[in-house]
Image: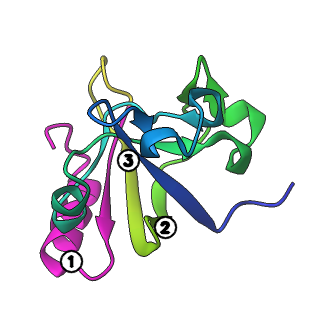
Amino acid sequence: MTKKLIYTIVPESTYNGGYLAGYYNDDEVVRPSYCYLHGKLETLIGYDIFGMLRSELEPDQIIDNRVSDKFVEGIHSCICMGKPCTFFRWKTNEHHKSFAGLVVLNSDTRALEYAQECYDNKTSNI
């Protein structure tokens, strides 16, 4: 299988019944730990939790319904609610958090700069 070039980000909300209010079942979506929507995207969606489609990931990139460490550190193109975004995912130096990350709208300059800074510094406090 070839590497996915653009990932689908699926917002999650306990307020309206789960992933996109029933458009996806829980078994179709996996969550990357310590990764969040940020900036104008978080404001647009109304919360910061998201998942990724299981079908877009390699089997070894999923463990216990979570995105595993096999989904590599990097800057990944993605789409959220039809809007082009970027998923910054980095390895931290903390024991309890192996990875952290932010998904931001490509049109949100301030959030892109912040996410890039977090990525460059490998910060765990996001």
**Secondary structure under badge 3?**
strand
Where does label 1 land, which residue? Answer: 108
The spot of residue 3 in percent (x, y) is 74, 60
| Mark number, residue 90 | 3
| Farthest residue, direction right | 1
Q: Is residue 83 above or below residue 64?
A: below
* Residue at 48% across, 54% down: 9
Q: Which residues are magenta?
A: 99-126
The spot of residue 102 in percent (x, y) is 30, 52
* Residue at 27% across, 83% down: 107
Residue 6 colored in magenta in the image: no
Which kind of residue does numbered mark 3 sit on?
Trp
Residue 113 colored in magenta in the image: yes
In space, the residues marked 2 and 3 are separated at their CA atoms by: 19 Å
Q: Is residue 108 above or below residue 86?
A: below
Whichever of labels 2 and 3 marks the residue nearer the N terminus, that label is 2
* Residue at 41% across, 59% down: 87
Q: In which quadrant will I find the C terminus?
A: top left
Whichever of labels 1 and 3 marks the residue nearer the N terminus, that label is 3
Which kind of residue does numbered mark 1 sit on?
Asp
Closer to the camera in the image, 123 or 48: 48
| Mark number, residue 79 | 2
